[in-house]
């Protein structure tokens, strides 16, 4: 597909007084826009594989190695990156 936007907004047309569950939205009342039209619009952002990898790496460090100081991470970055890649391989094997 051509011209895929990097982000878009679901225009749900609710007001703050309504309690809305995403699963209960009626599709005929929801549309999308490339620009925010209201503060209740839900933003969706397309992430590249590289961005998804970086986010996963950051979450892995936060969850698996919270005791490691930032200076240590910087000094041993390549090794820590290798460990993260190994954890992905082990996850895929499960």
Image (cartoon, rainbow, N blue to C red):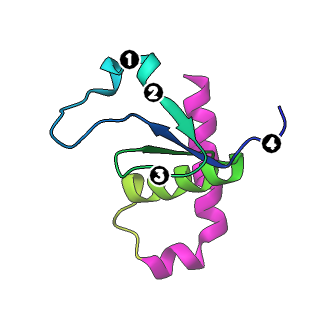
Label 3 to label 4: alpha-carbon separation: 33 Å
Q: Residue at x 59, y 72 (%)?
A: 76
Whether tag 3 and tag 4 are in contact, CB under 8 A, the answer is no
Q: Which residue is mark 1?
A: 26
Mark 4 surroundings within 10 Å by alpha-carbon count, few (fewer than 14), some (14 through 19), many (20 or more): few
- Total numbered labels placed on residues in the image: 4
Of helix, strand and loop, which one carries label 1?
Answer: loop
Q: Nearer the viewer, mark 3 or mark 1?
A: 1
Q: Earlier in the sequence, mark 4 or mark 2?
A: 4
**The label number, if any, that marks residue 30 in the structure image:** 2
Q: Position of residue 68 (x, y in %)?
A: 40, 69
Q: Position of residue 78 (x, y in %)?
A: 67, 66
Instruction: Give the image quarter of residue 29.
Output: top left
Q: Residue at x 27, y 27 (%)?
A: 21
Of helix, strand and loop, which one carries label 3?
Answer: helix
Q: Which residue is mark 3?
A: 60
Label 1 to label 4: alpha-carbon separation: 27 Å
Q: Nearer the viewer, mark 4 or mark 2?
A: 2
Q: Residue furthest right?
A: 2
Whether tag 1 and tag 2 are in contact, CB under 8 A, the answer is yes
Label 3 to label 2: alpha-carbon separation: 35 Å
**The label number, if any, that marks residue 3 in the structure image:** 4
Reply above or below: 14 against 47: above
């Amino acid at each position: 597909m051509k011209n895929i936007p990097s982000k878009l907004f679901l225009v749900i047309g609710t007001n703050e007084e309504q309690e809305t569950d995403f699963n209960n939205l009626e599709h005929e009342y929801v549309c999308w826009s490339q620009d925010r039209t209201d503060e209740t619009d839900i933003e969706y952002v397309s992430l590249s594989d590289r961005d998804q990898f970086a986010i996963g790496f950051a979450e892995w460090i936060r969850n698996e190695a919270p005791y490691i100081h930032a200076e240590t991470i910087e000094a041993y970055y390549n090794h820590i990156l290798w460990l993260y890649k190994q954890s992905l391989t082990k996850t895929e094997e499960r």
